[in-house]
Image (cartoon, rainbow, N blue to C red):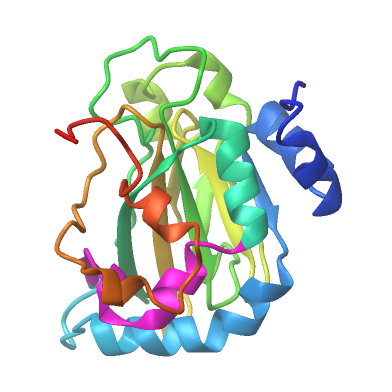
Amino acid sequence: YAVSDLLSPTIDALDLRQNVKDLVDNGYTVIQDPEAHALADEVRDAIIRCVPAPPEAKAPTRFTILDQDPVFADAITTPKLLALVEFLLGRGALFSQLSGSRRRQGPTSLGLHADNSWFPAPFPEWELSCTACFVTDEFTKESGATLVIPGTHKLKTHPPKDARQSLEGAIPIVAPKGSICLWDGSVWHGNYPRSLPGERVVLHMTYTRIGMQPIENYDHLDEAWFEGKSPRLPSLLGRHNFLGRRH
């Protein structure tokens, strides 16, 4: 696998070579970043505050929440995550979407899919997008973890009907609290229904290659909002992006 000369020192400094290999071989990886582990409880609490969850809802979810709590800005800029996003999507990658979910016990589950939802197959050789889940409750099959079919990113297509029905080759992404699970937009994935009491609380973070349209728009955020936050945020939110600008 090839890592650019510009990115290679960062990958080595953050000890991410195995994560890169996982992404190349399997289409997903599990990141252990001390900054993420330190944020896990705060992220979980923020999601619960931001995502209304009436008793009958099995998987309440809320989108466009970046500005709802300061901890979300910290979560999407953890160093190891951003380094691997750059590996997948190149320099200048944009932040695309942020959502919080609270999956509860019950049969509901998300069907098998690739995240390149708006693009016809075959997908290009280079990745269009990637998604990361900030794990605030341990990921196991019983807890309702993400399922993935390793290697399907190499097929560069959406899963056919028979694969969606059989889930042949699917495995759960098992990860402790504080992990970040990252996959590219081509890999086939979904989730297992939660069989345990309680909730699986997750922050879903999506990034896209520069030149692609982000799903969410945060142009309403003023300069004061960026104060005290990661210096990477303006670029992630397109503030340094010349595309679509008159000046």
- Taking depth in this image into account, of 216 and 193 the one nearest to the observer is 216
Identify which residue is drawn at 33% across, 82% down. 69
Is residue 47 shown left or right of residue 228? left
- Taking depth in this image into account, of 222 and 63 the one nearest to the observer is 222
Location of the C terminus by quadrant is top left
Which residues are drawn in magenta?
61-78
Location of the N terminus by quadrant is top right
Q: Is 68 within the magenta?
A: yes
Identify which residue is drawn at 51% across, 12% down. 125
Is residue 210 shown left or right of residue 52? right
Image location (x, y in percent) of residue 211: 32, 27
Identify which residue is drawn at 18% across, 88% down. 55
Residue 95 can be seen, yes or no = yes
Image location (x, y in percent) of residue 217: 18, 53
Is residue 15 shown left or right of residue 186? right
Residue 200 can be seen, yes or no = no
Up-down relation of residue 179 to residue 19 (above or below): below
Identify which residue is drawn at 37% across, 86% down. 46
